[in-house]
Image: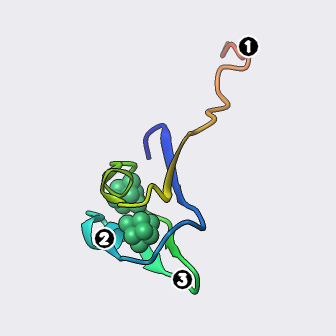
Amino acid sequence: MGNLKFTIDDTCVKCGACAEDCPVQCITEGVTRFNIGKGCIGCGDCYSICPVGAVQMHKRETPKSNSQTSEC
Ligand code: SF4
Ligand code: SF4
């Protein structure tokens, strides 16, 4: 949840620090890198802890209020 989305790129060295630190355990080990799965609460701990900067932070696009006025 939140406005931020986190992903792990190919520079991941599979140290496992992010998975250990994730408060909701949504990071799992993949074949070539770790992956962030469902359940991420956007706390940013993985982003802060990664020693090689493999965690990328993205702003979520929130498609809301597209000139939509809710009238009865
Ligand atoms: S942002 Fe927080 S909840 Fe989401 S994957 Fe990283 S450590 Fe886990
Ligand atoms: S902390 Fe960084 S390098 Fe370590 S497993 Fe997570 S993404 Fe990969």
Image side of residue 25 versus residue 36, left or right: left
Ligand 2, image quadrant it occupies: bottom left
| Residue 25 x, y percent position in the rendering | 33, 71
Instruction: Give the residue pinned by disc 1.
Output: 67
SS of the residue under disc 3: loop
Q: Nearer the viewer, residue 10 or 45?
A: 10
Per the image, the residue denoted by label 3 is 30
Counting other residues with Cα less than 10 Å from the Cα at mark 2, is it few (<14), some (14-19), or many (20 or more)? few
Please identify the quadrant where the C terminus is shown: top right
Percent position of residue 63, x then y:
67, 31
What SS does tag 1 mark? loop
Q: Nearer the viewer, mark 3 or mark 1?
A: 3
Please state which amino acid type lies under the numbered disc 1: Ser
Which residue is drawn at the image coordinates 31% and 66% (left, top)? 24
Q: CA distance from mark 3 to mark 1?
A: 42 Å
Q: Quadrant of residue 46?
A: bottom left
| Image position of 2 (left or right of 22) | right
On the question of residue 72 being in view, the answer is no
Q: Is residue 50 above or below residue 31?
A: above
Q: Return the x and y of residue 62 as percentages of the image width and height.
A: 61, 33
Sort mark 3 into few (<14), some (14-19) or many (20+) by Cα contacts within 10 Å: few
Tag 1 or tag 2, which sits nearer the N-term?
A: 2
- Disc assigned to residue 17: 2
Q: Are marks 2 and 1 in contact (CB under 8 Å)?
A: no
- The tag earlier along the polypeptide, 3 or 1, is 3
> How far, Cα to Cα, is label 2 from label 1?
43 Å
Disc 3 C-beta below 8 A from ligand 2: no
Q: Inspect the image, locate mark 2, and give the three-letter code of the amino acid beneath it.
A: Ala
Q: Is mark 2 within 8 Å of ligand 2?
A: yes
**Circle 2 SS class:** helix
